[in-house]
Image (tube, rainbow, N blue to C red):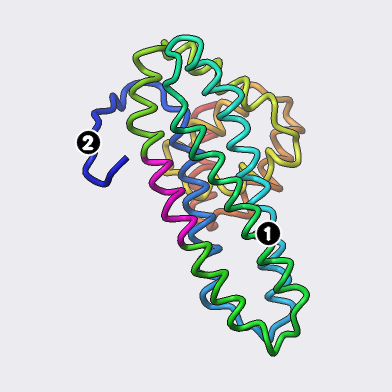
C-alpha cells in the first residue's frame, strides 16, 4: 500500500484491528523513544530496555500468529489469494524480529563503554521496522478491514476476535491489556472493560484491574473509568 491509497472504511461496522493496533503503536513508539535516549553506560537501563524489547517482539510474534491463524485462514476460505500480501509482510516481520534479536544479543555481549554505536544502529533498525509495521497496520485497518466487511457479518467478525482472545495464554493476555488500555479513548476502555466485567467472575476481573489496568492509567483516567464502569453496571 502506498501513502496515497484511500480506502473507505465503514466505521459503524465491527473493527477487530483498532484496539490492538493502538496498543502496539503506542508501546512500540515508547520503546523507540527510550532507545533513542538510553544511556549506554547504564547497565540497568540497557538491561531493562533489552528485556522490554524482547517482550515486544514476543507479543509481535503472537499477534502475527493470531492474524495468520484466525483472520487470514478465514479470508482464504471466502476469497482465495486475498491474504497473500499480508502473509508476505508477516514473513518479513519475522526476519526483522530475528535481526533485532541478534542485535540485542550483541549489545549484551559488549562492554558498556563500547555499546553506543551498537545502540545507535539498533535505534535506526528498530525505527525502520516501525515505519514498515505502521504502514502494514494501516493497510490492515483500511484495505483488509474493508475486505472483511464485505466477506463477513459483524457477528462473524466478533466470533473471529473471540477465538483469538480465547487462544491467548493468561500471562500474555495481561501484557496485551497493559499496552491496549492506555492507548484507548474513554469509550473504548469502557466497552472493553465493561464486557469483561459482565463476562468474568468478580475475582478474575478484579485481578485484571489491579494488575493490568490501574497501573497503566493516570489517576484521573482510572477514576473516570471506574465511575463509568459503576454506571454501566
Q: Main secondary structure of the magenta part?
A: helix
Q: Nearer the viewer, mark 2 or mark 1?
A: 1
Whole-percent x and y of residue 22? Answer: 46, 45
Quick check: is 124 in the magenta stretch? no
Residue 137 inside the magenta-drawn segment: yes
Q: Quadrant of residue 168?
A: top right
| Residue 51 in picture, x, y percent from top left | 72, 62
Which residue lies under the disc numbered 1?
A: 101
On screen, residue 71 above or below 230: above
The answer to whether 77 appears left or right of 147 in the picture is right
At horizontal 65% and vertical 53% (from top left) the residue drawn is: 98
Q: Residues within 10 Å of mark 2 (few under 14, many from 20)?
A: few
Quadrant that contains the N terminus: top left
Q: Nearer the viewer, residue 33 or 80?
A: 80
Q: Which residue is mark 2?
A: 6
Per the rendering, the mark at residue 76 is none
Front residue of this view, candidates 162 and 191: 162
At 51% across and 46% down in the image, what residue appears?
A: 23
Q: Earlier in the sequence, mark 2 or mark 1?
A: 2
Q: Nearer the viewer, residue 185 or 100?
A: 100
- Seen in the image, is 22 located left or right of residue 55? left
Tell me the magenta residue range: 128-138
Where on the picture, by quarter, is residue 142?
A: top left
- Secondary structure under tag 1 reads helix
Residue 179 position, x and y percent, is 57, 49
Q: Element at badge 2? A: loop
Residue at (53, 23) in percent of width and height: 71
Q: Position of residue 14 (x, y in %)?
A: 41, 22
Question: In percent of the image, x 61 and y 28: which residue is there?
Answer: 196
Quarter of the image for the C terminus: give it: top right
Vertical arrangement, residue 141 with respect to residue 219, above or below: above
Cα gap from disc 2 to disc 1, whole angstroms: 35 Å
Amino acid at each position: 500500500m502506498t501513502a496515497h491509497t484511500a480506502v473507505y472504511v465503514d466505521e459503524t461496522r465491527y473493527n477487530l484491528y483498532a484496539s490492538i493496533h493502538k496498543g502496539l503503536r503506542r508501546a512500540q513508539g515508547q520503546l523507540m523513544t527510550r532507545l533513542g535516549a538510553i544511556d549506554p553506560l547504564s547497565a540497568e537501563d540497557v538491561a531493562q530496555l533489552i528485556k522490554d524489547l524482547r517482550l515486544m517482539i514476543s507479543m509481535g510474534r503472537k499477534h502475527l500468529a493470531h492474524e495468520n491463524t484466525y483472520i487470514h485462514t478465514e479470508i482464504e476460505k471466502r476469497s482465495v489469494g486475498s491474504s497473500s500480501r499480508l502473509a508476505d509482510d508477516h514473513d518479513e516481520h519475522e526476519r526483522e524480529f530475528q535481526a533485532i534479536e541478534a542485535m540485542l544479543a550483541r549489545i549484551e555481549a559488549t562492554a558498556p563503554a563500547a555499546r553506543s554505536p551498537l545502540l545507535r544502529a539498533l535505534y535506526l533498525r528498530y525505527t525502520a521496522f516501525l515505519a514498515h509495521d505502521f504502514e502494514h497496520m494501516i493497510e490492515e485497518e483500511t484495505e483488509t478491514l474493508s475486505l472483511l466487511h464485505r466477506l463477513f457479518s459483524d457477528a462473524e467478525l466478533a466470533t473471529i476476535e473471540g477465538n483469538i482472545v480465547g487462544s491467548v495464554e493468561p500471562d500474555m493476555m495481561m501484557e496485551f491489556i497493559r499496552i491496549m488500555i492506555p492507548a484507548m479513548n474513554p469509550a473504548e476502555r469502557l466497552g472493553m472493560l465493561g464486557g469483561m466485567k459482565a463476562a468474568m467472575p468478580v475475582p478474575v476481573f478484579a485481578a485484571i484491574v489491579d494488575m493490568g489496568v490501574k497501573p497503566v492509567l493516570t489517576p484521573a483516567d482510572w477514576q473516570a473509568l471506574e465511575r463509568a464502569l459503576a454506571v454501566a453496571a
